[in-house]
Amino acid sequence: MYDYSDSAGLAAFLAIVGFLSFVFFVGFYVLSSWFLMKIFDKAGVQGRWRAWVPVYNYMVFAKLGDLNPWLVLIGLGAGIVLSWVPVLGSLIGIATFVLTLLAAWRVGLKLQKEAVWLVLYFFLSIVWLGILAFDKSRWNTAIPAAPWAGNGFLSDRTSWSGIPAQTPAGGYPANPVTQPGYPAAGGYPPAAGYAAPTAGYDAPPAGYSAPPAGYSAPPAGYTAPPAGYTPPPAASEPPAGYTPPPAAAEPPGGYTAAPSAASAPEPPAAPEPPAPSEPPAASEPPAASEPPAAPEPEGPNAPRA
């Protein structure tokens, strides 16, 4: 006899699973559409309704990611139509997800997110959308062109009203990965006359100052002082107008320096007896005065007074 209780229990279980799946799907759709609406606002997309239309919202997302939006529609449609083919349907679904992954990479770059954020999108896309929707990042299209920019099949060549073009006004900046040697965007060119250091050059340590003018390198064989050595202070120059004191006079010949105070004192020499005084010399008598000379007799011819 057929047991209707087992079939009823199975039907009830399937109904509960279907209801929970429907609630989960609706919740996921509402949250993802809300987060997409916030991201579209940052990108300057006009009309918030675009984020709430199924399939179309991810076409806009792909367009903001520099991909052909029609590829998303083709991928989703082909996946639904060919879902009954086990392998082909799965491959189309994977290809469509890869398209959204590439678009997420470009959208993340325009919102200042590195490529590593794709790992979060791969496992939890709803969390990735929520972070980009509510962080303080701003939309910036001045990033290097996508690797597929020259591919007419993948790159976006469409123009839709209400969705701003993603090509920067001054053109895409150079990509330092695909064009090595070209300065990256935002870099500053070196000053005029600056020459790159030679190979093997080591930058001076922090706090290093150039030697003063007139500095000459130490001679060969010079050995640097040990660590912790402090050079003696330089002798200060005398002030202007200073006259050095005269040099000490040299002692005369035969001079013997006084004994140092540390040597033992010698006893004084015995006083010598005074020498006998000599008697004064006798005074000589004064010399006798000579008589005046007698006048000579006058001659007969002498004149008279």
Image: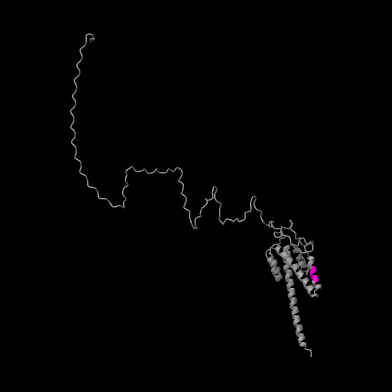
Where, quadrant-wise, is the N terminus in this rendering? bottom right
Quadrant housing residue 55: bottom right
Say which residue appears at 78% left-offset and 65% top-offset. 69
Q: Residue 113 at x, y = what percent? A: 68, 64
Rendering coords of residue 133 (x, y %): 70, 66
Residue drawn at 70 percent across, 63 percent down: 109
| Left-right relation of 23 to 231 | right
Q: Pick out the residue farthest to the front.
A: 221
Q: In this view, does 120 lie above or below 254?
A: below
Q: Say left or right for 249 vs 159.
A: left
**Relative to 183, residue 284 above or below:** above
Q: Which residue is drawn at 74% across and 74% down?
A: 25
Name, please, the residue furthest toward the top: 300
**How far from the left and from the top, in percent, is residue 236?**
46, 48
State the residue lying farthest toward the right. 81
Query: Is residue 209 or residue 110 the one in the foreground?
Result: 209
> Which residue lies at the image location 73% right of the left edge and 69% below the top edge?
34
On whether residue 76 falls in the magenta region, the answer is yes
Residue 200 on image: x %, y %: 61, 56
Q: Quadrant of the C terminus?
A: top left
Whether residue 10 appears in magenta in the rendering, the answer is no
Question: Of 117 and 150, which appears nearest the observer?
Answer: 150
**In terms of image quadrants, where is residue 142?**
bottom right
Residue interval drawn in magenta: 73-78
Q: Looking at the image, is 259 positioned above or below residue 85?
A: above
Does residue 260 sit above or below 29 in this rendering?
above
Whether residue 117 is visible here, answered yes or no, is yes
The overriding secondary structure of the stretch rendered in magenta is helix
Q: Which residue lies furthest to the bottom in this view?
A: 1
